[in-house]
Image (spheres, grey):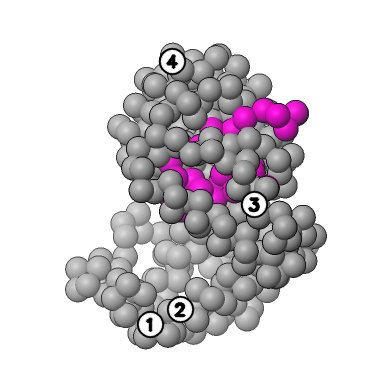
Amino acid sequence: MPRGKGIGVIGAGLMGHGIAEIFAMRGYSVSLMDVKEELLPKALKGIRSNLTLMAEKGIGSRDDIDPVLAQIKTTMDMAEAADGAYCVIEAVFENLELKQKIFQDLDALCPEETILATNTSVISITEIAEKSGHRERVVGTHFWNPPYLIPLVEVIRGKDTADWAMDRTYNLLKEVGKHPVRVNKDVPGFVGNRLQHALWREAISIVERGIADAATVDECIKYGFGLRLPVLGPMETADMVGTDLTLAIHDYILKHLESSPEASPLLKEKVERGDLGFKSGHGFQEWSPEAAERIRHNLMEYLLEWTKGRGMTS
């Protein structure tokens, strides 16, 4: 696919400017649009900061920073952002009516072959496309934060999404160095969040039932099976130990696991009390500003080192 093709990004917030960065780093011309003028220079500043941090870690070069930024133009005009774009990616906040209006407008602005993608993490792709005339070219692209470092992008098929839209989106993301996966049904949480929150439900339940405290739960994951996860997923593990053993374990343990369709009473209690985690200093654990910042720093260092080890040095 020619890199002369343009990419439009609607929404210049944390996810939007991270997505713009991905394509600009691979030589694409990017139009980054937001209705709030003050967000546009802030977005470019954020991209420069990301690129500088990556260069310090040996991912790319400081000499590449200005050329990458030169690939990105900012605008408050959706028509300008969409003009000539091969693909337009919406990355605004999670509001169904707003997203529907954006896709209705994009549908009128873009030729029928333009891919229209939404970076929602929770809202139905089918519902987002509902007011569009050409729903067959609307597809989900769930990037994970920070999008310029985490490789996974879920490519989600809505009820009306055409095969060509899925294929072109998948190939585009592959071409810019992401790790796209196909999600064949438009269900709440797609794949990644369904797995993640199933784990969180059990983790919170263990704390709520007094089986172990929050720090112990995290330690069991980080120093136990979590170490295997980058190279051995749950389906691979089931095959490795044998589906017969997996069945035997499930026959015994599943009835003892948390299966409530409601959010945890303990979680609700903490939110009602204002124990909101890092932002309040209290959550399932106590967090000083220094401790919270250390966690954020360690996560970023880990992701940068992982990205460097993956060979993304240019």
Q: Which residue is under mark 4?
A: 108
Can the viewer see residue 102? yes
Question: What amino acid type should be assigned to the residue bearing mark 4?
Answer: Ala
Q: Could you tell me how far apart the alpha carbons at marks 3 and 1 are, in whole angstroms? A: 34 Å
Say whether marks 4 and 1 touch (CB < 8 Å).
no
Find residue 299 and report its image quarter.
Answer: bottom right
Crowding at dot 1, Cα within 10 Å, few <14 / some 14-19 / many 20+, comes out as few
The residue range painted magenta reads 1-25
Q: Which residue is under mark 2?
A: 293
Q: Could you tell me how far apart the alpha carbons at marks 2 and 4 are, in whole angstroms? A: 45 Å
At horizontal 62% and vertical 73% (from top left) the residue drawn is 301
Q: Nearer the viewer, residue 112 or 250?
A: 112
Say whether marks 2 and 1 touch (CB < 8 Å).
yes
Q: Which residue is under mark 1?
A: 289
Counting residues from the N terminus, which is met first, the one under dot 4 or under dot 3?
Answer: 3
Q: Which residue is under mark 3?
A: 66
Question: What amino acid type should be assigned to the residue bearing mark 2?
Answer: Glu
Q: Quadrant of the C terminus?
A: bottom right
